[in-house]
Amino acid sequence: MDTNESKRKRKTWSADEKIGVIRKHLSKSKMVDTCEENKVSPVVFSQWLKTVLEAGRDALLGTSKKETRERDRLIEKYEKELQRKNAVIAELSSEVLDLKKKSGEN
């Protein structure tokens, strides 16, 4: 084996390249042919396909940009409320500690 071949790094695939390979597969009958043609491990290809199908499922559920924005606003609202509650808890805890100190001094 050539020393350059043994030091060869794995190919890094862009999202568009991955989608292209998956599209080729969908037009063929065998995954093995697609993998051999594109020099992709069947295990790696299966992971790509699983990821695409899961994302497609989410897209088909009807989550629109409007729904996503509404969910993000709701999350932001709850995060602010949580911060406010944490501040109140911290303030009350401080007051309790102060009262304990004072009662211990008397």
Image (cartoon, grey):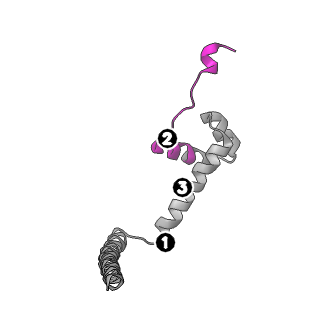
Alpha-carbon span between mark 2 and mark 3: 13 Å
For the point 34% across and 86% down, the residue is 103
Magenta region, residue range? 1-22
Q: Is residue 32 above or below residue 77?
A: above
Residue placed under numbered mark 3 in the picture: 52
Q: Looking at the picture, which amino acid does disc 1 mark?
A: Leu
Q: Can you give x and y, in whole percent of width and height, for residue 35 in the image?
A: 65, 39
Q: Would residue 101 be found to the left or right of residue 49 on screen?
A: left
Q: Residues within 10 Å of mark 1 (few under 14, many from 20)?
A: few
Residue at the extreme front: 106
Quarter of image, res 87: bottom left
Q: Is residue 24 magenta?
A: no
Provide residue 80's location: percent of width, then percent of height: 30, 74
**Would you say 35 lies left or right of 66 here?**
right
Identify residue for label 1: 61
Nearer-N-terminus badge (2/1) = 2
| Residue ranking furthest to the top | 2
Residue 9 inside the magenta-drawn segment: yes
